[in-house]
Image: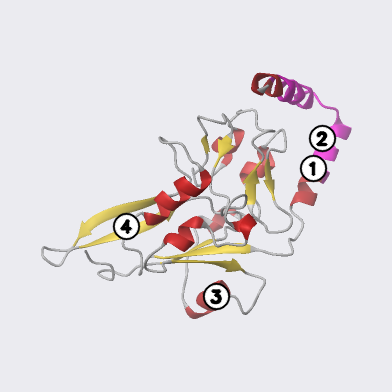
Amino acid sequence: MENSKRRFLKGTCALLAGASGATLLATVSASNEAKADPSVKYALIHDETKCIGCKACEVACRETNHVPEGVARLKIEQTGPYGEYPNQFYHFSRKSCQHCEDAPCVNVCPTGAAFIDKETGIVSVDAWKCVGCQYCIAACPYKIRFINPVTHAADKCDFCRETNLAQGKQPACVAACPTKALVFGNLKDPTSQVVQVLKANPTQRAKVDLGTRPKLFRIVAKSGEVAI
């Protein structure tokens, strides 16, 4: 069944590659529709001043979303130690999907497998449509996509869209964080915690000069704020 699906979709891609101008215009139209302003706009804040590098978020993500060993939707990267012993400290940063409003991965996908959910603004993947061409992996400026060795489709963080979020829960990483270093919510709700934290703290986003408009924010740790 899996092989039949991929043969069908690959054949479709071949047809698309030789499409007429009218088909290309239809593709552009569909892309513009995908960029329509969602009714909800989810975002995530990683507060590096609170992160202790315990990686509980990584474990929760893997278990909740059945992520196979050898690949990961989320990584906490540690750098350091900095400073002189015994006053040394480490820095922890999050590497995961940025959920761009103008997502290069979506723009290059030939089958529509990569898409932006109109209701939430979440960048997601339809594994059934994915043919494993890896265009999205090449196009992502944040280098966070991978091919799932079980589904053989592109994979990444989707804010637990099909698991916890679908059940009205917080993303697994947010729920598991013992220091509340992760804040998730709707940017369009002025009363949401994510909006209140953004208003109260200076934040950074990665590679904003590319015009991708990422929705993963960082509260950057200052030297010595996180010590072990």
Residue where numbered disc 4 is placed: 54
Callout 3: few (<14), some (14-19), or many (20+) C-alpha neighbours within 10 Å? some
Of the numbered discs 1 and 3, the one sitting upstream in the chain is 1
Q: Amino acid at mark 3?
A: Gln
Determine which of the numbered discs, if any, sits on residue 28 in the image.
1
Real-space Cα distance between discs 3 and 4? 23 Å
Q: Secondary structure at mark 3?
A: helix
Q: Amino acid at mark 1?
A: Val
Q: For the N terminus, which image quadrant?
A: top right
Query: Magenta residues, as a range?
Result: 7-29
Any magenta on residue 20?
yes
Q: Nearer the viewer, mark 1 or mark 4?
A: 4
Residue where numbered disc 2 is placed: 24
Q: Residue at x 24, y 55 (%)?
A: 80
Real-space Cα distance between discs 2 and 1? 6 Å
Real-space Cα distance between discs 1 and 3? 36 Å
Question: Do the CB atoms of the residues marked 2 and 1 lie less than 8 Å apart?
Answer: yes
